[in-house]
Image (cartoon, rainbow, N blue to C red):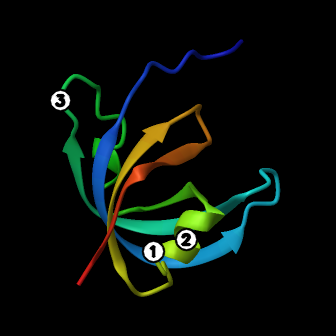
Amino acid sequence: MSVRIIENWSDLVALVKAIQPAEDLDGFDLVELQVEEAFEVEGFPNLLAESIGTSIEVFFPDECVKSYEISPGICVSCRVRRANLTKLFVHRESISVLI
């Protein structure tokens, strides 16, 4: 039985815990985020509201990790969607490094 995921987005504020190359997806890194806040994006369900206080793994394009100099210990703001039950993806145009 397959579960269909609806179009969804959440704006997160999170601490980067770890980064590793994605083994099953070329051109992406798997970034572990400790979610501090999860905001609704107008017009879309927030499927990550319950992730506050937990760690999640999100696929980031590796060029975004490099260009934004994302590394463990920094805080980021980013828009994330749930693609299926196990995979989350960042919106490449909605990433900010917070100071």
**What amino acid type is highlighted by mark number 3?**
Glu
Tell me if label 2 and label 1 are in contact, CB under 8 Å: yes
* Residue at the spot 45% in from the left edge and 18% down from the top edge: 6
Q: Nearer the viewer, mark 1 or mark 3?
A: 1
Could you say which disc has been placed on residue 65 in the image?
2
Residue 21 figure quarter = bottom right
Q: CA distance from mark 1 to mark 3?
A: 26 Å
- Between 50 and 61, the residue placed more toward the observer is 61
Residue 58, given in percent of the width and then of the height, sits at 54, 55
**What amino acid type is highlighted by mark number 1?**
Tyr
- Above-or-below relation of 79 to 32: above
Q: Earlier in the sequence, mark 2 or mark 3?
A: 3
- Between 94 and 43, the residue placed more toward the observer is 94
Q: For this view, does 69 lie left or right of residue 75?
A: right
Q: For this view, does 83 lie left or right of residue 92?
A: right
What secondary structure is marked by label 1?
A: loop
**What amino acid type is highlighted by mark number 2?**
Val
Q: Nearer the viewer, mark 2 or mark 3?
A: 2
Residue on which disc 1 sits = 68
Q: CA distance from mark 2 to mark 3?
A: 26 Å
- Between 43 and 46, the residue placed more toward the observer is 43
Could you say which disc has been placed on residue 42 in the image?
3
Residue 81, given in percent of the width and then of the height, sits at 44, 39
Q: Earlier in the sequence, mark 1 or mark 3?
A: 3
What secondary structure is marked by label 2?
A: helix
Instruction: Name the image quarter holding the C terminus.
Output: bottom left
Residue 17, given in percent of the width and then of the height, sits at 49, 78
